Image: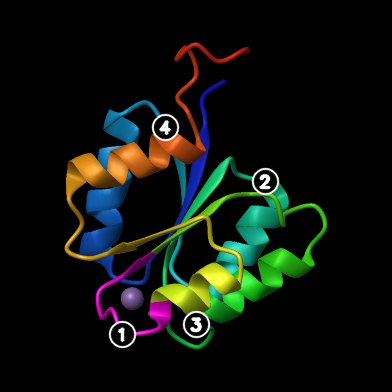
């Protein structure tokens, strides 16, 4: 069983890049384009990690993060927030709401994978099964 990462991203091209990158590095992925779909998938699968775009339609990444933290079954799933439009204070707000890490786009592949591995080490990486 591999590690499963839920990608929450509304831009198709970014979704494809993140999905390819994670799969190429041994992760299984789930995809959601908005907060409601993401919450449904999170409840169904309890992923090992969530990569969360902050700028989402309807429900913002911040609101999604708050939903997640109110759910006893999901609140310990680490969330990496990613943003294309980093505003001063965004990182503080997202971290205060409970995200485990924060990355501003454009994403450096190497940095992104380092952060992902920090929160969801690949299976067979010295981890107990
Ligand atoms: Mn977006």
C-alpha span from label 3 to label 4: 25 Å
Q: Within the image, what quadrant is residue 28 found in?
A: top left
Camera-side residue: 113 or 29? 113
Residue 67 image offset from top left, x and y in percent = 69, 73
C-alpha span from label 3 to label 1: 14 Å
Q: Circle 2 sits on which residue?
A: 46
Q: Circle 4 sits on which residue?
A: 27
- Ranked by sequence position, the earlier of labels 3 and 1 is 3
Residue 75 image offset from top left, x and y in percent = 72, 57
C-alpha span from label 1 to label 2: 30 Å
Name the dominant secondary structure of the magenta segment: loop
Q: Among all residues in the image, which is located at the extreme right? A: 72
Residue 14 image offset from top left, x and y in percent = 24, 61
Query: From which residue to which does the magenta span run?
Result: 82-90
Q: Circle 1 sits on which residue?
A: 87
Name the front one of labels 3 and 1. Answer: 1
**Regarding ligand 1, which quadrant of the image does it lie in?**
bottom left
- Ranked by sequence position, the earlier of labels 2 and 3 is 2
Residue 19 image offset from top left, x and y in percent = 32, 46
C-alpha span from label 1 to label 4: 30 Å
Quadrant holding the C terminus: top right
Marks 4/2 in contact by CB < 8 Å: the verdict is no
Marks 1/2 in contact by CB < 8 Å: the verdict is no
Camera-side residue: 36 or 111? 111
Q: Within the image, what quadrant is residue 98 found in?
A: bottom right
Numbered label attached to residue 60: 3
């Amino acid at each position: 069983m591999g590690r499963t990462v839920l990608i929450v991203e509304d831009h198709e091209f970014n979704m494809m890049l993140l999905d390819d990158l994670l799969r190429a590095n041994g992760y299984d992925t789930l995809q959601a384009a908005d907060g409601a779909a993401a919450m449904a998938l999170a409840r169904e699968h309890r992923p090992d990690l969530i990569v969360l775009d902050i700028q989402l339609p309807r429900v913002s990444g911040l609101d999604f993060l708050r939903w997640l933290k109110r759910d006893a079954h999901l609140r310990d799933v680490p969330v990496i927030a990613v943003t294309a439009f980093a505003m001063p204070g965004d990182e503080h707000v997202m971290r205060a709401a409970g995200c485990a890490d924060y990355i501003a786009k454009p994403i450096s592949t190497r940095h992104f994978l380092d952060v992902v591995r920090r929160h969801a080490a690949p299976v067979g990486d010295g981890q107990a099964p």
